[in-house]
Amino acid sequence: MTSPTDTDNKSSDKSLEAMVQFSQTYAQRTGTYFCSEPSVTAVVIEGLAKNKDDLGSPLCPCRHYEDKEAEVAAAYWNCPCVPMRERKECHCMLFLTPENDFAGQSQTMTIEQVKEIRESMG
């Protein structure tokens, strides 16, 4: 049995699955790759899913916002954010171009992998 605080910090399976699918499809479509360190990818995907649950949109989880709802409404930092769409610049290191030193060779990650990393991080 989980307490409310256990689930408050985790995304729903539905949003997590949606963000895993989105991330894989977007990486393949844009010719970008996930970070060579799988925990970075998993944490970002989890953050996107959590923001989708909490805010209704996958707001970039790696930035600080004074007002998350206002940021979602503005849509600039909703994933894929404007810098990613315009210049393939991903602040979160989720979508990396092949020449980036941190780019891995993978464009896939399963929901099980994300959950396993999420659980191992506590």
Image (tube, rainbow, N blue to C red):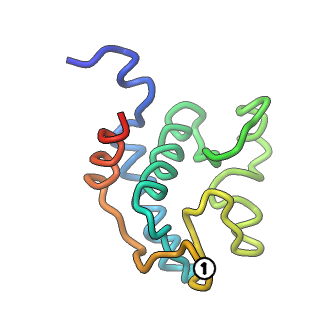
Q: Position of residue 54 (x, y in %)?
A: 54, 31
Quarter containing the N terminus: top left
- Judge from the rendering whether residue 94 lies leftward or rightward of residue 37; answer left or right: right
**Against 36, is 54 above or below?**
above
Q: Which residue is mark 1?
A: 97
Quarter containing the C terminus: top left
- Front residue of 6 and 78: 6
Q: Position of residue 37 (x, y in %)?
A: 44, 63
Q: Position of residue 111 (x, y in %)?
A: 31, 53
Considering every residue shown, the one lying at the far left of the view is: 1
Q: Quadrant of residue 80?
A: bottom right
Identified at 70% across, 44% down, the residue is 63
Number of dots carrying numbers:
1
Identified at 35% across, 22% down, the residue is 6
Identified at 43% across, 68% down, the residue is 24
**Against 99, is 1 above or below?**
above
- Judge from the rendering whether residue 8 lies leftward or rightward of residue 76; answer left or right: left
Q: Secondary structure at mark 1?
A: loop
Considering every residue shown, the one lying at the far top of the view is: 3
Q: Position of residue 84 (x, y in %)?
A: 70, 67
Kind of residue at badge 1 = Thr
Q: Residues within 10 Å of mark 1 (few under 14, many from 20)?
A: many
Q: Quadrant of residue 20?
A: bottom left
Considering every residue shown, the one lying at the far front of the view is: 101
**Against 89, is 16 above or below?**
above
